[in-house]
Image (cartoon, rainbow, N blue to C red):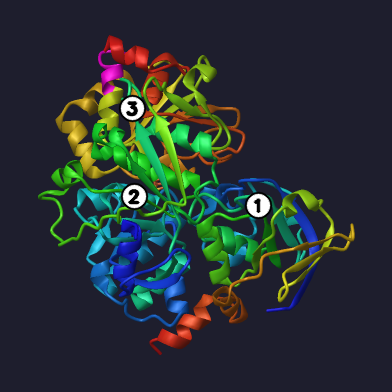
Amino acid sequence: MHAIEKILAKAAGKAAVTTGEIVNCKVDMAGINDLYLQTLRSFFEMGGKKVHDPNKIVVFLDHYAPASTIMQADNQKQFREFCWEQGIDLLMDVDQGVCHQVMVDKGLVYPGQVLVITDSHTTIHGAFGAFGTGVGATDLAIIMVTGQLWFRIPEIIRIHLEGTLPQGVYAKDIILKVIGALGADYGVYRGVEFTGPVLKQLSVSERMALCNMTTELGAKTAYIQPDEITLQFLQGKVQHEYEIFTTDPGYQYAAEHTFDVTGMTPQIAAPHSVDNVAPVARYAGIPVNQAFLGTCTGGRAEDLAIAAKILQGKKINPRTRFIVVPASKAVLLEAMANGTMKTLVEAGATFVTPGCAACLGTHEGMLAAGETCITASSRNFPGRMGSPKAEIYLGSPAAVAAAALTGKIVDPTEYLKQG
Amino acid sequence: MQQILKGKAFVYGANIDTDQIYPGRFLDLTDPDQVGKHAMEGADPNFVKEVQPGDLIVASTNFGCGSSREHAAVTLKAAGVGAILADSYGRIFYRNAINLGVPLLVCPGIGQKVKRGDSLSLDMTTGTVTNLSSGETMQAQPLSEYVMNILASGGIKPLIKQQYGQG
Ligand code: SF4
């Protein structure tokens, strides 16, 4: 069996599972985002009164942090009151940041966990050897009532990463290249495991970016076998006991793909789909009105530090605005402590509240019709950051910072050398 | 659940994501009637004006990819969509639609075979789709027993309520 199958088998109380089988699994942690008041509605519509286990539920007020409309404020108010009534202590209010980063910062994610959040990028937690998947509001409400949810055991695809990553090229570039090669629906219903020597060159932050973006392959979940890098990161953070599962030798993957990253250049996904990917040279010179650095994909302390390296002692292009959203409060504190924030603000960055901000086109950095944005986030769908007539390019945090500096899409490796 | 569904087709291409089905800027709405007013707005601003109860959505691959927002299924249901037929679906959208009791079938190749405005007839038990405008028939994959049971109960909520409802 694959490690993912072992995680699900254990949660289902079974010795073994097979691909395609539908199993009912106990869920270790269920997360609800402030976008989905429907979760509470569905809970009550299903006759729910008391949640199955208040210690296994976490509520994130992250997408609308802090509220920009009366309606958003009212939704958040109802969530807070629900938590107080139900004894849910894990209420992450508007100061905390994006759900996925908060989970990690607070030590709530661990290997072997079954983690379900009302957010599609829950695949990110495969970086820790957890089974993370996103569901809708009603599915989450079912967990609130029963403590369980059904899953179909997915086929697993292996993506093997070979070679040496060049300087200035990042996990975001790798995953964009993979998505461009395989297509936005390649991973639908499937799990994606990353293997290979490149993983040893990637920090936990970079591994998170890799797993996060498997959602843009359509994947149900992602997986990286926990190793010393993972364990070192988790040490002292995670209080919960955990078990590390390993894949049996000879396990048959549904498909295997090898990518050699040696000599790779930075990659860009052009409007309007994440698999519309080409090397940055193809789009070099396109003027950008907004450079957006942040989110659960590209807003960690390391990402901000890369941007600071490029912008140290410089000023952004006067025709470009540079929005920076730390993924979480912990990221913001780190950026304050190590001087990254000062560097970026002096260079002309506009800092906004840790959270999702303009990533999903609700507030804090919306785009007008006819505007162009380059972003370190995950999606460039039409209308994702405001007007459907805006153009969104996806790139690495370095590509975003270099675009803020020059006012156009450029190859960021040049600017990292000078720095 | 009706056995035979008939309606006019609204046809879309590949990778219609949930931001196109229901733009993020309206996610703070929670009343289904309000949510229904923005159905397909990102892909087709005329959809809401033209759709009639029972009409069908036809799409190519990966319909409903992207976010987990149940609003995408709620908006189509509230707008009166009778069923969805596509080459394939985003997985969370698929679960959400079934949970809400919106029939959606995998029908390989249908995205290429139907034009906007064609009249379709869908037999839920056999999965046979007939294009009444062109006379062509197509075969959708039959739904699993698990899914049929949810649809027949009018969605998952009544089922869970029966089994676990706390009175
Ligand atoms: S930052 Fe963006 S991708 Fe991440 S959870 Fe928020 S809206 Fe989703």
Q: Is residue A321 magenta?
A: no
Between B91 and B99, the one lying in front of the other is: B91
Q: Earlier in the sequence, mark 2 or mark 3?
A: 3
Give the residue type that dot 1 points to: Met
At a point 38% along the width and 44% down the height, the residue shown is A212
The magenta segment: A308-315
Q: Quarter-wise, where is residue A369 in the image?
A: top right
Give the residue type that dot 2 points to: Tyr
Chain of residue at mark 1:
B
Where residue B40 is drawn, which disc sits there?
A: 1
Judge depth for marks 1 and 3 and give the one in front: 3
Q: Is residue B113 left or right of residue A132?
A: right
Residue B11 in the image: above or below residue A292: below
Residue A70 in the image: above or below residue A309: below
Chain of residue at mark 2:
A
Where residue A163 is drawn, which disc sits there?
A: 3
In the picture as drawn, the residue positioned furthest to the front comes out as A250
- Tell me residue A359's x, y (percent): 44, 41
Between A127 and A145, the one lying in front of the other is: A127
Query: What's the distance in space between the residues labelled 2 and 3, CA to CA?
Result: 20 Å
- The response on whether ligand 1 sits within 8 Å of label 3 is no
User: In the rendered view of the protein, which quadrant contains the C terminus of chain A?
Assistant: top left
Query: Does dot 1 land on a helix, a strand or a loop?
Result: loop
